[in-house]
Image: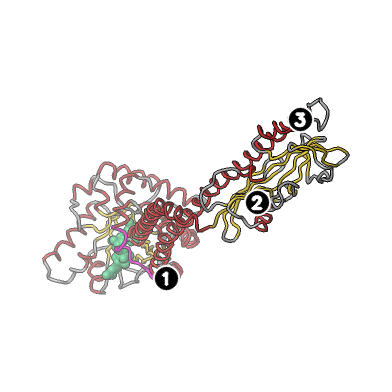
């Protein structure tokens, strides 16, 4: 992902991170307020069911007691007993006795036998036939409920069934299971109640919040307008919005931190390593006398997703500092094998020099990596040279054991950028090296009268004393090449011969630059 896409993604994520938690908390405060209100309405509805059960229980008990009366029906005793039970039973208004389907007497006294038994709407499990709405003879206009057991019935005012205390604005309704409205408080709309009891136990019907409770034989509905819970929503918001703001701040902080990390040079390099965004260019090394190509130095480049190439001196120091260099070395080794396997197998005189970091030299961890990479390729270990700068050999003891092991495996070991550090002849004597690369800064002084120009012959002399092969680095002019040949320097590398190039070009260069056998 390039920088602009990362920035756009970060901005989008930050916006989402700000909006989503706050919107979620606003929504959650509404949900929680509704849930809380549903619980409250449920409580009112359950209370109505409990009240209705008590009222029915009382009326049923009165009916069972009058059924036990063994005296003559409609006698003064019978009527007195019915009256007594009516007075003692809070929910009942009147008690009556039926004979042949007609009311013969009631708690009020004898009747004329013109009132017919009502048709029940339903019968409870304990055998009580219930008529939800009936017009009593004595109280015209006010509908009552009739409960009958065998030949006796009681009349109950339905208001007794919803005789519960509710908060202002809460409507309460009690219906039969078949939807007949038995009693109501605060004037609910019967049509809405009918619709509500046909649906789920709680919910929102247009502007009405409702909850139902179901008992045996009846259903209670408690409802109130949605506007009633606005205060509760506001309160929930006061609690939840700070949490939403905290979450938003946290997410934005994370997005900023991650994108800054991702956009930092180290973040980009880490991703490059993970995505294997490196390629290798090869700079030919030639035999100075003949111009023959004898090999190349593998020089890593970071190929960005947009195709641009980043020079190694811009990222190698960071890679060394962060420890990513070992992963990069491993990728270079794999790329060299991939790019040049056929050439190296076809021409055993060609070698490739791979740059090692100080860590690679001090730990020797790179040697098994190379060994594994060369397995089954046909490439000989002596075709892989290992280059390290003087800094790589600072820890002389561990460096020596790495060099010894590398040479045992067949690799040649080269000291790079020679002369730029503090290496001395005695220091070099302690390391079993194969070759020395004279740094470009000394080659640049050739044929000049600079103060350091006299150092170059000394380096050459020192290398010869130690019987090291010499590669002159950064050869740019024919005069430099001529000087080096004159001083018996065997190999050279530099723009005079070729610049670093992709593998295919190097293979072509090598074939063409090699003298016919
Ligand atoms: N640990 C690793 N270090 C690596 C690896 N690949 C490269 N490097 C190091 O990065 C430094 C810069 O390398 P680069 O930009 O590739 O430059 C090399 C040549 O292009 C340049 N050169 C060669 N000839 C000339 C010349 O005639 N003129 C001129 N101006 N420049 C020239 O020199 C660089 C090679 O230097 P050296 O390695 O010292 O031989 C550099 O320090 C690389 O070592 C890697 O895989 N791992």
Which residue: 75% across, 48% down?
134
Judge from the rendering whether residue 361 lies leftward or rightward of residue 62; answer left or right. left
Q: Quadrant of ligand 1?
A: bottom left
Write down the residue under mark 1. Answer: 306
Which of 187 and 477 lies nearest the eye of the viewer? 187
Lower sequence index among marks 2 and 1: 2
Contact between labelled residues 1 and 2, with CB atoms less than 8 Å apart: no
Q: Residue furthest bottom?
A: 478
Q: Identify the mark at residue 66; answer none if there is no mark.
A: 3
In the picture, which quadrant includes the N terminus? Answer: bottom left
In the picture, which quadrant includes the C terminus? Answer: bottom left
Write down the residue under mark 2. Answer: 200
Q: Identify the mark at residue 264; answer none if there is no mark.
A: none
Secondary structure beneath dot 2 equals loop
Q: Measured along the vertical axis of the image, is residue 151 above or below residue 297?
A: above
The answer to whether the residue bearing label 1 lies less than 8 angstroms from the nearest atom of ligand 1 is no
Determine if the magenta segment contains residue 219: no
Lower sequence index among marks 3 and 2: 3
Q: Which residues are magenta?
A: 306-317
Which of 126 and 360 lies nearest the eye of the viewer? 126
Contact between labelled residues 3 and 1, with CB atoms less than 8 Å apart: no
Which of 357 and 118 lies nearest the eye of the viewer? 118
């Amino acid at each position: 992902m390039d920088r602009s896409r990362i920035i756009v993604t970060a901005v989008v994520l930050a916006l989402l991170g700000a909006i989503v938690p706050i919107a979620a908390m606003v929504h959650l405060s509404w949900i929680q307020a509704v849930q809380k209100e549903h619980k409250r309405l449920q409580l009112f509805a359950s209370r109505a069911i409990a009240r209705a059960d008590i009222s029915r229980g009382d009326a049923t008990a009165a009916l069972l007691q009058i059924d036990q009366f063994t005296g003559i029906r409609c006698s003064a005793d019978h009527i007195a007993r019915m009256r007594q039970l009516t007075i003692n039973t809070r929910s009942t208004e009147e008690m009556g006795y039926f004979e042949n389907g007609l009311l013969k007497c009631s708690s009020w006294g004898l009747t004329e036998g013109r009132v017919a038994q009502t048709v029940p709407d339903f019968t409870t499990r304990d055998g009580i036939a219930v008529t939800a709405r009936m017009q009593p003879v004595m109280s015209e206009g006010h509908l009552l409920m009739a409960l009958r057991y065998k030949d006796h019935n009681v009349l109950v005012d339905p208001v007794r069934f919803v005789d519960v205390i509710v908060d202002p604005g809460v409507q309460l309704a009690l219906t039969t299971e078949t939807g007949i409205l038995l009693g109501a408080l605060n004037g609910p709309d019967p049509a809405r109640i009918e619709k509500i009891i046909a649906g789920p136990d709680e919910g929102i019907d247009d502007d009405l919040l409702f909850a139902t409770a179901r008992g045996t034989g009846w259903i209670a509905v408690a409802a109130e307008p949605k506007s009633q819970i606005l205060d509760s929503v506001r309160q929930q918001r006061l609690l939840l919005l700070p949490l939403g703001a905290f979450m938003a701040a946290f997410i934005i902080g994370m997005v900023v931190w991650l994108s800054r990390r991702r956009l930092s040079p180290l973040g980009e390099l880490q991703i490059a390593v993970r995505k294997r965004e490196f390629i290798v260019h090869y700079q030919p090394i030639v035999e100075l006398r003949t111009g023959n190509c004898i090999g190349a130095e593998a020089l890593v480049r970071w190929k960005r997703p947009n195709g641009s190439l980043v020079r190694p001196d811009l990222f190698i120091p960071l890679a060394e500092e962060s420890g990513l260099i070992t992963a990069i070395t491993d990728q270079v080794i794999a790329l060299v094998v991939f790019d040049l396997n056929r050439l190296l197998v076809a021409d055993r005189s060609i070698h490739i020099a791979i740059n090692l970091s100080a860590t690679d030299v001090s730990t020797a961890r790179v040697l098994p990596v190379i060994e594994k990479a060369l397995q089954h390729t046909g490439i000989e270990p002596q075709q892989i040279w290992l280059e390290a700068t003087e800094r790589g050999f600072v820890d002389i003891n561990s460096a020596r054991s790495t060099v010894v092991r590398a040479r045992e495996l067949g690799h040649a070991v080269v000291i790079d950028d020679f002369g730029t550090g503090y290496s001395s002849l005695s220091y070099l004597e302690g390391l079993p090296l194969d070759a020395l690369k004279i740094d470009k800064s000394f080659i640049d002084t050739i044929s000049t009268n600079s103060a350091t120009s006299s150092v170059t012959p000394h380096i050459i002399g020192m290398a010869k004393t130690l019987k090291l092969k010499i590669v002159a680095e950064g050869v740019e002019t024919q005069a430099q090449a001529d000087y080096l040949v004159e001083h018996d320097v065997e190999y050279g590398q530099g723009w005079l011969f070729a610049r670093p190039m992709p593998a295919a070009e190097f293979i072509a260069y090598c074939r063409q630059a090699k003298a016919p056998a």
